Image: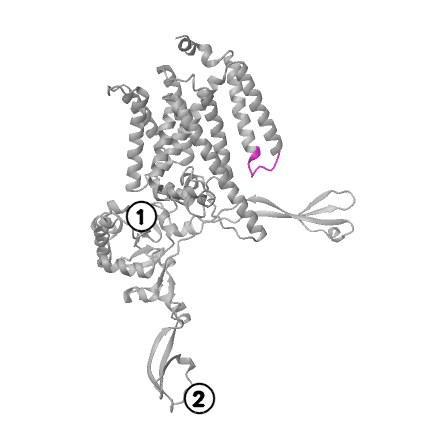
Amino acid sequence: MDEMRLRNTKRDIIGRSPILNVTAIVLNLIGVFFVVKGAHESTVNYENLMVIGGSALIVISLLTMLALKGLFLFSYVSRVLVGGLFIVSGLVKANDPWGFAFKLEEYFEPNGLSFDFPFFEAFSDYVLPLSILICVAEIVLGVAIIVGGKIKLASWSLVIMMMFFSWLTWYTHSCNVDQTMAMELGEEFSRQCVTDCGCFGDALRGSVGRSLTPYESFWKDLVLFYFVFIIFINQWKIELNTVKENWIMVPASLLVVVFFSWVFGWYFPIFFTLIAVLGAFVAANLNIGKIGKPWKMAIFVGIVSLLFSTYTTAYLPVKDYRPYAIGNNLSEKMNDSEPQVADYYMLYKNVKTGKIDSVLNWEDKYSDTTQYVYEDLYLDVISEGKEASISDFVARVDYELLTEEERQKPLIDSIIQAEIENYYEDKMVLKSVEGYTDTIAAMDYDTLYYPDSIYTIVSEYNGLVDASMPFSMDLTNYIVSEDYIFLMTIRDMESANLGSLDSFKEVLNGARENGIPFYVLSPATTAAVDAFKAEHDFDATFLGFDGTEIKIIVRSNPGLILLKKGTVLDKWPSRSVEEFEDIFEAHIKLPASED
């Protein structure tokens, strides 16, 4: 009872001096910012001063809070920051569970995390359930931290989770450093490094323009770990919020959610947070046996999060951050790269004084080796530049697999005429008087070497120069230039949802009747494609395509997209492919005023 009374006193929450404790918390947050900024790879000025000054602010402010009993107040601030961030982080991944599952798959591959820790490979068959579980857990823990529900279990779970993820991002960063060093030394590097931890799914890349580097992810986890630790050491004081505390904690946490929603350009997390938190309060007051309020709140939030994750898994992300989102033009995304802008400085050391000169424009005096010695070349990056949003959209098909109608399309025909002579030539089959046959290029036929008295021309035909090198055509430009074109994607034939194949056939037939191209993008081998087409009576033309890029285009397997001159008009998962007539009316048929 004494402990409860102490907790409800004003002094217990705000400490001995509200003003000094609030000031100390603000300085602590500033110190954290300076430390992270100083340790960041892109910081080139005063980085050591930032780290030292920031560390000093953190230590001094913590000692001040410890002396003035302000750590408990700091735990409220930490709960707001951690809770809000965990909800957003969990939700952006729950928006695209398949994307996060593919990232886990990278980690669990034999040459990935499993290279050094083989037991992780056992999780490779469960990446999707793990993806959903992690997303739901993050959201539930975020809400629990905000409302103070089962705080001991929640804080321990957060500590364990942050220990693991901090180690994982450090491992990922170390892998990339080792790989870079190996490349510089020309050594073989057998491990596969993950370059993007997937902490926020594709949300950062799709909104800000790039994801966090492994090093940045590591520091993000360290900062989170720091705030989690503040919550952890105060766990014995924290209880389920009072009504008054909820009026402060929920709006404050919502501000954190609003900030990240603004960063990600997606405001659904605000509404989701309100539904989750307010619904949790309602659920807490339901009469469900002997289940405690915190558990009822956790169950409600868990169910809501699971339903959202299940929906986006079965269909498509609610918010598509990938370059293949509806409305994007693929040609523009393939050509939106920006070159790096940098100055190259030559560093010369003065032999007498030891002073280093940074030379941007060459001067003759530096050619005097008795005065100056070349030290190194320094790259001053002015603008990092960026890679194209789409770099692996390349669709190829063997010439022999194209129908005669497809070959006659102007753009495809131009491709054929430009390259066919490099792959095909006129051939002759000769038979000797001894009964042996020989196939030669027609241009090599000469009676001097093949006299009529010995050789007889059996047949002439046009064939491949090298039978092992079929004429493989790049149809990428054709695809992004057509007025309308359907692209079906099959990333893996064995795991494809074949129950929906009739829907795709219906669209295929409708497209053919209306003269609209329909192609299937797949990384499958020719033998696998032939077997699939024969087994399912599916006679569409398949184009060879990168398997990883297919995962980016449409998460569903199979999936369907409709392009108009390279712009994505719409996309459909296998479970909800619309009838061709509806697609035609919605996207292709011109309004009466334009007919």
| Residue type at the position of mark 1 | Leu
Report the residue at 74% width, 53% height from top: 367
Q: Which residues are magenta?
A: 38-45
In-front residue for pair 192/314: 192
Q: Nearer the viewer, residue 408 or 394?
A: 394
Q: Position of residue 584 (x, y in %)?
A: 23, 51
Q: Quadrant of the N terminus?
A: top left
The amino acid beneath tag 2 is: Leu
SS state under label 1: strand
Magenta residues, dominant SS class: loop
- Is residue 88 left or right of 556 when viewed as pictured? right
Q: Is residue 110 magenta?
A: no
Q: CA distance from mark 2 to mark 1?
A: 63 Å
Depth check, front residue: 313 or 587:
313
> Which image quarter: residue 178?
top right
Residue 430's tag is none
Report x, y in % for residue 300. 29, 27
Query: Of discs 2 and 1, which sits in the foreground?
Result: 2
Q: Which residue is mark 2?
A: 448
Residue beneath disc 1? 569
